[in-house]
Image (tube, grey):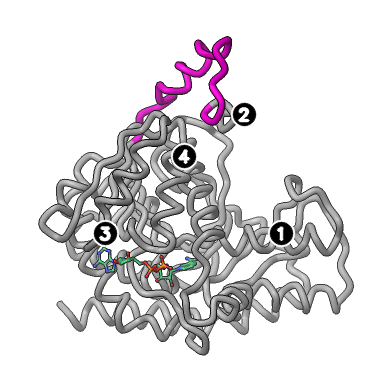
C-alpha cells in the first residue's frame, strides 16, 4: 500500500502522499557495511520504512555514492553517509538500531566458519565503537559465522560494561524466510500464512527448522521432513554455488534483515505482538546462546517462546542433540577470540 503511494502520486492522492512523506515514527537506524552486497539492498528497504527518520550508512569505502543514490528516493528518512573509522562514532550516536553486515562472504567450497579469521576482527572492532556510542541500541549481527560473531559481540559489550543480552541479536531471519518459502511450495500453501520456527544456530546442521510446529498445521512424510530440513540447512550454499565465486545471498538476506529491522522498530514503537526467531543469549538449553522465537518489546527481548521446544518429534529431538556440540564449539571459539585479544 505505502509502496504504491511512493511510486505514483496522482494529484488527487496528493494529500495522502504528503502524509507518507512524514515518518510515522522517528527511529534512527545505522547499517555498518552499507556499501556491500547486503548493505545496499538493505539500505534501500530500510529507506522505504515509514518508521525511520534517519538512515546512517557506514562503510570503509564507496558509501558516499550509495547514500547519494538512496537519498533521492522521496520517502521520509534522511540518509547520511559515514566513511572510515574516524566517522564511525558520529554514525552511531543516538541510533536506535544498528545492523552489521560488514565482512567477507563465502565462496564455493567454504563453510561459514572459514570466514572467522577475517570477520571476527571486523565484528570486534566495530562492536567496540558501538559499545562506546550507542550501548542502548538494538544490535543486529549479520556477519558470519553468526554462531561465533554474536558471542564476540557479547564479550566486547561485557568488557565495556554495557552488555544488555536482551538487545543483542544474531540475524537468523533468512533461515525462517527460506523455510517458509520451501514449505509453502512443497505443500502448496499460501505463502503469507506459513510460519516455520527455526532454532539452534546459523550454520549447517545447527540450523534446525521445527517443521512439526509449522503454522498452519501441516503433516509431512518422513522423507519430506528429511529433504526439507536438509534443503533449509544448505540453502545458503545453493546460492553460493549458483553465484559461483561472486559471493553469497545478498538480496534475500537484505529482505530478511529488513523484516527483522521492521519488527524491531514496531516493537520499539509499542506494538505488543512482535515475534521473531533470533540467535540470542538464552536459557532454553544448556548452551549460552541459542536461536529460538522471542517476543520483542521496547526493551528488547520480552519473552522466549519456550513452548516451541516442547513436544519435539523424535527427528527434531535427535537433530537438536546432534547440533549442540558444533554450536557449543562455535560459541566458545568466539568467546576465546575476544579473550585472546584482550
Ligand atoms: P560484501 O563483501 O559484498 O560486503 C561487505 C561490506 O563490508 C563491504 O562493503 C566492505 O567494504 C564492508 N566492510 C569490510 N570491513 C569493514 C569494516 N571494518 N567496517 C565496515 N565495513 C566493512 O559481503 P556481503 O555479501 O554483503 O556479506 C556480508 C556478511 O554477511 C558476510 O559475512 C556474510 O557471510 C554474511 N551473511 C550473513 C547471512 C545471515 O543469514 N546472517 C546471510 C548472508 C550473508
Question: Residue 62, labelled with which disc?
Answer: 3
Q: Which of 143 and 242 is in front in this view?
A: 242
Which sits earlier in the primary sequence, circle 4 or circle 1?
A: 1
Question: Which quadrant of the structure image shows residue 227?
Answer: bottom right
Q: Which of marks 2 and 1 is in front?
A: 2
The Cα atoms of the two marked residues, 2 and 4, are separated by 25 Å
Of marks 2 and 4, the one in the foreground: 2
**Do the numbered discs 4 and 1 sit on residues whose CB atoms are within 8 Å?**
no
Q: Do the residues labelled 2 and 1 touch (CB within 8 Å)?
A: no
Residue 134 in magenta stretch: no
In the foreground, 10 or 193: 10
Q: Earlier in the sequence, mark 2 or mark 1?
A: 2
Tell me whether circle 3 and circle 2 mark residues in contact (CB < 8 Å). no
Dot 2 corresponds to which residue?
1
Q: Which residue is drawn at 26% across and 71% down?
A: 122
- Nearer the camera: disc 1 or disc 3: 3
Q: Quadrant of residue 26?
A: top left
> In the image, is residue 10 above or below residue 33?
above
Real-space Cα distance between discs 3 and 4? 35 Å
Q: Nearer the observer, disc 3 or disc 4?
A: 3
Asked whether, in this view, residue 67 is left or right of residue 14, the answer is left
Question: Which residue was labeled with disc 4?
Answer: 297
Q: Where is residue 60 in the image (x, y as percent from the top left)?
A: 22, 63
Could you say whether the residue bearing mark 1 is in a helix, strand or loop? helix
**Precedes in sequence: disc 1 or disc 3:** 3
Q: Above or below — where is 227 with respect to 213? A: below
Q: Name the residue under label 1.
A: 181
Outermost residue on the bottom side: it is 109
Image: magenta residue range: 6-27
Cβ of mark 3 under 8 Å from ligand 1: the answer is: yes
Amino acid at each position: 500500500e505505502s509502496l504504491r503511494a511512493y511510486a505514483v502520486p496522482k494529484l488527487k492522492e496528493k494529500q495522502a502522499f504528503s502524509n507518507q512523506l512524514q515518518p510515522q515514527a522517528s527511529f534512527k537506524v545505522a547499517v555498518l557495511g552499507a556499501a556491500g552486497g547486503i548493505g545496499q539492498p538493505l539500505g534501500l528497504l530500510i529507506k522505504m520504512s515509514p518508521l525511520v527518520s534517519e538512515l546512517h550508512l557506514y562503510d570503509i569505502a564507496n558509501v558516499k555514492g550509495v547514500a547519494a543514490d538512496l537519498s533521492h528516493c522521496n520517502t521520509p528518512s534522511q540518509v547520511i553517509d559515514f566513511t572510515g573509522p574516524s566517522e564511525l562514532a558520529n554514525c552511531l550516536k543516538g541510533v536506535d538500531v544498528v545492523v552489521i553486515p560488514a565482512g567477507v562472504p563465502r565462496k564455493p567450497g567454504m563453510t561459514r566458519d572459514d570466514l572467522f579469521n577475517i570477520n571476527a576482527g571486523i565484528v570486534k572492532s566495530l562492536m567496540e565503537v558501538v559499545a562506546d556510542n550507542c550501548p542502548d541500541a538494538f544490535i543486529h549481527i549479520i556477519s558470519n559465522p553468526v554462531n561465533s560473531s554474536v558471542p564476540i559481540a557479547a564479550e566486547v559489550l561485557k568488557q565495556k560494561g554495557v552488555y544488555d543480552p536482551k538487545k543483542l541479536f544474531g540475524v537468523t531471519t533468512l533461515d525462517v524466510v527460506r523455510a517458509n518459502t520451501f514449505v509453502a511450495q512443497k505443500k502448496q500453501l499460501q505463502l503469507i500464512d506459513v510460519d516455520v520456527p527455526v532454532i539452534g544456530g546459523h550454520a549447517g546442521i545447527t540450523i534446525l527448522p521445527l517443521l512439526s510446529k509449522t503454522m498452519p498445521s501441516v503433516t509431512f512424510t518422513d522423507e519430506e521432513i528429511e529433504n526439507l530440513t536438509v534443503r533449509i540447512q544448505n540453502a545458503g550454499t545453493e546460492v553460493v554455488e549458483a553465484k559461483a565465486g561472486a559471493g553469497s545471498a545478498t538480496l534475500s538476506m537484505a529482505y530478511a534483515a529488513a523484516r527483522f529491522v521492521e519488527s524491531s522498530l514496531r516493537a520499539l514503537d509499542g506494538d505488543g505482538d512482535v515475534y521473531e526467531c533470533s540467535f540470542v543469549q538464552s536459557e532454553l538449553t544448556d548452551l549460552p546462546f541459542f536461536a529460538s522465537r522471542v517476543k520483542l518489546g521496547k526493551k528488547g527481548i520480552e519473552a522466549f517462546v519456550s513452548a516451541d521446544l516442547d513436544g519435539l518429534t523424535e527427528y527434531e529431538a535427535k537433530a537438536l542433540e546432534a547440533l549442540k556440540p558444533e554450536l557449543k564449539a562455535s560459541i566458545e571459539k568466539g568467546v576465546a577470540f575476544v579473550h585472546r585479544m584482550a
